[in-house]
Image (cartoon, grey):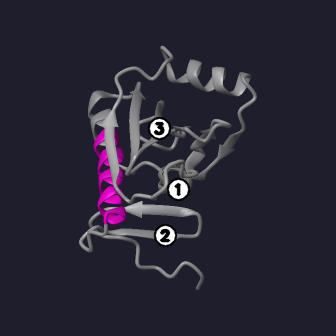
């Protein structure tokens, strides 16, 4: 199975890292939780509602679409048609409390159950790897190439600017 676009995941995770800090000391602790309802009954209705509100849909590789709401607290990733988990959407909600960054992810996947399970596992694993990397765990493997971030057991070793 092709994995979700690292571009999309990198965009969402990059927001989490760079989102303005409203507490005196910036923390590298990332707490991940999972939501239960994405707020829309279908992937298509979520994308339609967000674009109708005037939010910019940024195209990514493989047809993925990313939307970041103006408050930078929520980011959406819509899988492109080339993704085996299509149609699916991931909503990331970021909040800060003293000493912690919270990332809640909620996934709506309308593909086959097996594809959705694989997609969910991959998204969750990438966030977990990033959390470990942010906490200073040297065993966490993340790499950045161009505008994409990939976290996992075997990061891309290709130089970003050959």
Viewer-proximal residue among 55 and 5 = 55
Q: Secondary structure at mark 1?
A: helix
Q: Which residues are magenta?
A: 119-135
Viewer-proximal residue among 25 and 113 = 25
How far across and down, in percent of the image, does residue 23 sit?
Answer: 49, 50
Q: Is residue 153 left or right of residue 99?
A: left
Q: Is residue 29 left or right of residue 96?
A: left
- Extreme bottom residue here? 162
Q: Which mark is residue 92?
A: 3
Sooner in the amino-acid sequence: mark 2 or mark 1: 1
Real-space CA distance between mark 1 and mark 3, rounded to the nearest whole angstrom: 12 Å
- Extreme top residue here? 41
Q: Which residue is mark 1?
A: 14
Please report the residue visible at 58 percent of the width from the left and 18 percent of the height from the top.
45
Q: Is residue 33 magenta?
A: no
Give the class, few, some or many, for how many residues have Cα within 10 Å of label 2's Cα (few <14, many ≥20). some
Q: Which residue is mark 2?
A: 144
How far across and down, in percent of the image, does residue 55 sit?
Answer: 71, 33
81 lies above or below 12: above
Real-space CA distance between mark 2 and mark 3, rounded to the nearest whole angstrom: 20 Å
How far across and down, in percent of the image, does residue 5 sit?
Answer: 48, 51
Real-space CA distance between mark 2 and mark 1, rounded to the nearest whole angstrom: 11 Å
Sooner in the amino-acid sequence: mark 1 or mark 3: 1
Q: Secondary structure at mark 3?
A: strand
């Amino acid at each position: 199975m092709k994995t979700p676009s690292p571009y999309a995941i990198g965009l969402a995770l990059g927001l989490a890292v760079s989102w303005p800090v409203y507490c005196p000391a910036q923390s590298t602790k990332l707490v991940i939780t999972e939501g239960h309802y994405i707020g829309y009954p279908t992937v298509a209705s979520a994308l339609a509602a967000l674009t109708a509100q005037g939010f910019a849909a940024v195209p990514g590789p493989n047809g993925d679409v990313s939307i970041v709401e103006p408050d930078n607290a929520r980011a959406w990733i819509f899988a492109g048609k080339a993704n085996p988990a299509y149609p699916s959407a991931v909503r990331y909600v970021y909040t800060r409390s003293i000493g912690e960054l919270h990332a809640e992810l909620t996934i709506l996947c309308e593909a086959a159950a097996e594809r959705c399970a694989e997609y969910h596992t991959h998204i969750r694993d990438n966030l977990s790897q990033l959390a470990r990397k942010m906490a200073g765990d040297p065993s966490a493997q993340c790499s950045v190439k161009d505008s994409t971030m990939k976290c996992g057991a075997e990061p891309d070793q290709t130089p970003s600017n050959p």
